[in-house]
Amino acid sequence: MIELADIRSRVVTILQDTSYTRWTKTELNNYINDSLLDLVRTIRLPTADVSLTINSSTYLLSLPTNLMDISGGSIDGRELPIVTTSEMKSLASQGRLPTVVKDGEYSVTEIFGNPIWSKIEDWTTSTGTPQALVIDQKSSSIIRVWPIPTDEALIKLTGTQRPTRMSDEVPYSFIDDTHINYPEDRIITNSLNGWSSTDLLVDDTSRTFTFDSTAQTIEGSDGSTIFEIADTDYIKTCDIDYVWVDALTFGALERAYLKEHDLRNVEKSEYFKNKKLAITIDAHRTEPIHPASITGGVNLNRFIVRR
């Protein structure tokens, strides 16, 4: 677990701007969050699952907001292969798509196996038990369930978890205790990119508030409602192991030195970019789990005897 304040303290020390004179705290927070996205996009970790209901009307699924991409999916424990749109078009033109779909019968090997001539001309309109997820690219905003399901089912999508933007300047939530016996959790919907202390906060009921960062309160525009902000209302950490703190630090420095006008320094930006890339490549090599990275994985097949 890495803390935002720790990364930022490293950044301002190297920038020699601990008083936030040349780079504001908001700017540096944005640079750190951009660096975090770069790292997660490369190593594709951590992962998350999202369950959605599909039927003949909802077979085109929007990429869940907490996922950066899709790496797989399953229905009732039956894994669904990922197929690209171009592969589906190619298989359809060759008549190699299965015509009769039985629950659990076809796997990705059989879809790409021996030719099975199909009478279906348009694969995008075929119906049956879902056999695959079709996407244009790994981070496609739309995921197609193929074929179109005839019955309602619960599908579990697996992908890279999109890290929540960290901020110790603006709260993400607060407790609405207008009705003291029925307190409710409210979410702040403002974009944190470019936020300044004079901006109003908007909650999920479209109410506007003035935020007092010193008193840690938000006051309604009518002046009649004041809510206190707790430390838990901020998101100040990211679920990345501390060993990769330098990657986030160098990524933030890379962006800080690309700032225009008198603070721009392309040479320093390139220097920290290269240092960030070296660490990111190392993370990409060591973080994902593969057979040779776990005990017994590299030798497992040598102990299997088939007769």
Image (cartoon, rainbow, N blue to C red):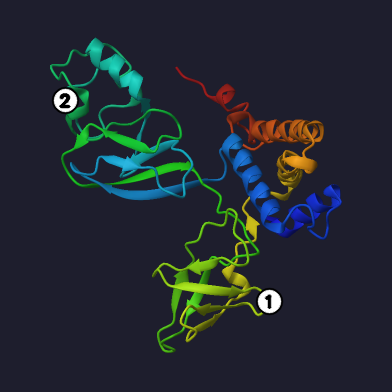
The residue drawn where x is 40% and y is 84% is 182
Q: Work out whether mark 1 precedes mark 2 in sequence or the reverse, and give the earlier one.
A: 2
Report the quarter where the N terminus lies: bottom right
Pick the residue in front: 56 or 170: 170
Q: Is residue 100 left or right of residue 224?
A: left
The residue drawn where x is 46% and y is 82% is 222
Pick the residue in front: 302 or 147: 147
Where residue 286 appears, x then y in whole percent?
67, 34
Q: Is 21 above or below relative to 263?
A: below
The residue drawn where x is 56% and y is 65% is 199
Q: In this view, does 81 lie to the left or right of 186?
A: left
Q: Tally the numbered discs.
A: 2
Q: Indicate which label's residue lies in the foreground, 1 or 2.
A: 1
Query: Which residue does the numbered mark 2 point to in the structure image?
Result: 100
Looking at numbered disc 2 in the image, what kind of residue is underneath it? Val
**Disc marking residue 7:** none
The crowding category of the residue bearing disc 1, from other C-alpha atoms within 10 Å (few below 14, some 14 to 19, many at least 20), is: few
Q: Is 128 above or below relative to 19?
A: above
The crowding category of the residue bearing disc 2, from other C-alpha atoms within 10 Å (few below 14, some 14 to 19, many at least 20), is: few
Q: In this view, does 162 lie to the left or right of 36?
A: left
Alpha carbon separation for disc pair 1 and 2: 66 Å
Quadrant hosting residue 232: bottom right
Query: Which residue does the numbered mark 1 point to in the structure image?
Result: 214
Q: Is mark 1 on a helix, strand or loop?
A: loop
Where residue 120 appears, x then y in whole percent?
15, 20
